[in-house]
Image (cartoon, rainbow, N blue to C red):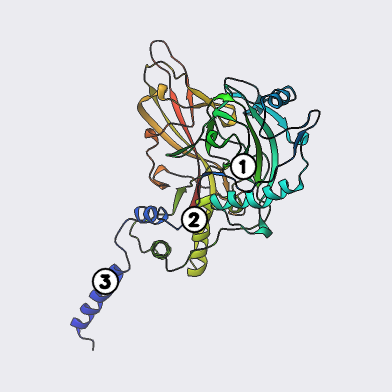
Amino acid sequence: MENPTDIVELEEDEENSSEEEFVDGELREDLDAALSADFAFTGKYAHSAVLDNVPLPGLSVDGLGPIGLPLSPRDAESLRSHAKQAPFGHGDKTVVDTAVRHTWEVAAGAVKFSNPAWNKFVAETVVKEAVQALGVSYSPAIAPRCDLYKLLLYETESHFSPHQDTEKEPGMFATIIIILPSEYTGGQVRVSHGAKNTTFDTAPFSAVGFTLLTWYTDVKHEVKPITSGFRLALSYKLIHTARNTLPPSIPDSDAAIQNLTTVLRNWDEQRYGDEVDQVAYILDHEYSSKSLKRTSLKGIDAHLVAVLVRICKKESLNLKFHLACIKHTLSGTPSMDEPASNWMYGKAGKRRFSDSGFALEEYYDGDTEIVHLANLDGTPAKKSITIEEEDLMPKTEFQELDPDYTEYAGYMGNEPGDTSYLYYRSVLLISVA
């Protein structure tokens, strides 16, 4: 016959064992900290450098002939007569507005290089420096393709207001600008990404130097007005051509990897007391629905997804990954301040908000909507998913950020109409199966 005392002790042991299955902490907080750690990614969102040992390109333009470098004022005037005012994308239209973009352009098909060493230099030396600076894996066998897009001429007062480059063809992930020898002053290039911003001043090297500028397509940038002289530049598209190319993995011994592995394993084994089915991690870059796939991810996003997939495969974790474009909307009552006059053109044909003239005095609604959902291979996901604001990480106080766009209903009598702040983000969805 069993001793009753033994039964009690056994039940107490089982209870203690059950309690030990759970870990201290809150999953979202632990995962947020683990995903935000430094995973040894050294890439930049934008890069500038003076190029060394550059061959002369042997530049010429159809109908004009050879163009000498450094660019002389006489050749600049001749080139301008063979160029056209550069347009910019405004929704599904292409428009010319010199208040936004005052630049002259020559199409790639009319630009020739008589020196064969030039294209080789661009394809090998320039591309290698650009992609390595941006944190993209590089080897000659899978090097991205670099296609000429336009020859650009800036004169005094030329500029380009803040904007983002469009993905001009599938696989395009970055822009390369090579500034050719042409003396000028002004023309600083200001790039920004999230809370980071940098200004590149290439004028000091312009008289005789070749300067490289490169950035990811979703990086906001502007060209400040040229104050004297001419700025001549070649604009290239940097395009992924190899399938399934991923950034190199980092050692398992890395402390950040070990911590992330522990959090993911505890979540997979349901060792957190809170029941969390999914999180939506806001990626560092923005992606269109066409580029929402693992092989098109940029910089630290590609690095992070590679780490997560590798951990789950090694640990046999039953977690699922999706990529999504989301729209977060904050609605409320605006202040009675004068409307903002500082706008710049953005995506989808809407005017992009760049000043807080429509400050919301009171928020009464917030909503997160999935605009596009895809599997990691880019195929549309068939499952139905909804995202709550609590699912988003890092925790984002959207009301403290300038919106991507505003929608304003206008004044109604003596009262301001409803105003909505729209925020577009790309996220990695991580869910338990």
Residue furthest out toward the right: 63
Marks 1 and 3, how far apart in space? 62 Å
Q: Amino acid at mark 2?
A: Leu
Marks 3 and 2, how far apart in space? 38 Å
Q: Residue 333, image x and y in percent?
A: 38, 23
Q: Dot 2 corresponds to which residue?
A: 304
Report whether 272 appears left or right of 246.
left
SS for dot 2: helix
Res. 291 image quadrant = top right
Q: Residue 22, image x and y in percent?
A: 32, 65
Q: Dot 3 corresponds to which residue?
A: 15
Disc 3 residue crowd, few under 14, some 14–19, many 20+, Cα 10 Å: few
Q: Nearer the viewer, mark 3 or mark 2?
A: 2
Q: Nearer the viewer, mark 1 or mark 3?
A: 1
Q: Residue 331, image x and y in percent?
A: 42, 29
Residue 278 visible to an observer of this rendering: yes
SS for dot 1: strand
Q: Nearer the viewer, mark 1 or mark 2?
A: 1
Q: Amino acid at mark 3?
A: Glu
Compared to residue 163, the image places residue 128 above or below, namely below
Q: Which is nearer the eye, 430 or 124?
A: 124
Marks 1 and 2, how far apart in space? 24 Å
Query: Which quadrant, please, contains the N terminus?
Result: bottom left
Q: Which numbered disc flags the more N-terminal residue, 3 or 2?
A: 3
Q: Which numbered disc flags the more N-terminal residue, 1 or 3?
A: 3
Compared to residue 398, the image places residue 146 above or below, namely below
Report whether 269 appears left or right of 385.
left
Q: Which numbered disc flags the more N-terminal residue, 1 or 2?
A: 1
Q: Amino acid at mark 1?
A: Ile
Q: Residue 315, image x and y in percent?
A: 47, 69
Q: Dot 1 corresponds to which residue?
A: 176
Residue 378 visible to an observer of this rendering: no
